[in-house]
Image (cartoon, helix red, strand yellow):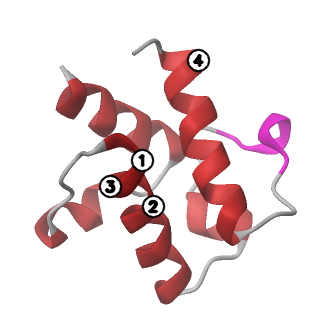
Amino acid sequence: MEEKELRAVVVATLKTIAPEVEDAELRPDRPLRNQVDLDSMDWLNFLIGLHEKLKVDIPEADYARLVTLGDVLDYLKAKLK
């Protein structure tokens, strides 16, 4: 999956939880939860949504590695190889 396509899936998943999200405003190097104002349950629902859409297992032990949009995209790219 190309990075542009993967980003579109990630943003679409994020919009199911925070419909006000504008893709163009998301910075890949800033904490995603802060940019979108997600609480811990929203964040968990986001990760579950990614799992369901992409069929990628995201173990709880990896949650701390997923801070920025860039982190999420890099992680998913590696898992999808």
Which residue matches tag 2? 49
Residue at the image point whose x is 34% and y is 31% from the top: 74
Measured as percent of width and height from the top left, residue 18 is found at 74, 68
- Mark 4 to mark 2: distance in Å? 18 Å
Disc nearer the start of the sequence (3/4): 4
Asked whether disc 2 touches disc 3, contact meaning CB atoms under 8 Å apart, the reply is yes
Residue 54 is left or right of residue 59, and the answer is right
Which residue matches tag 3? 51
Task: Please provide the residue range marked out in magenta.
Answer: 22-27
Disc nearer the start of the sequence (4/2): 4
Identify the element where label 3 is drawn. Answer: helix
- Mark 1 to mark 4: distance in Å? 16 Å
Looking at the rendering, in which quadrant would you find the C terminus?
top left
- Mark 3 to mark 4: distance in Å? 18 Å
Asked whether disc 3 touches disc 4, contact meaning CB atoms under 8 Å apart, the reply is no
- Mark 2 to mark 3: distance in Å? 5 Å
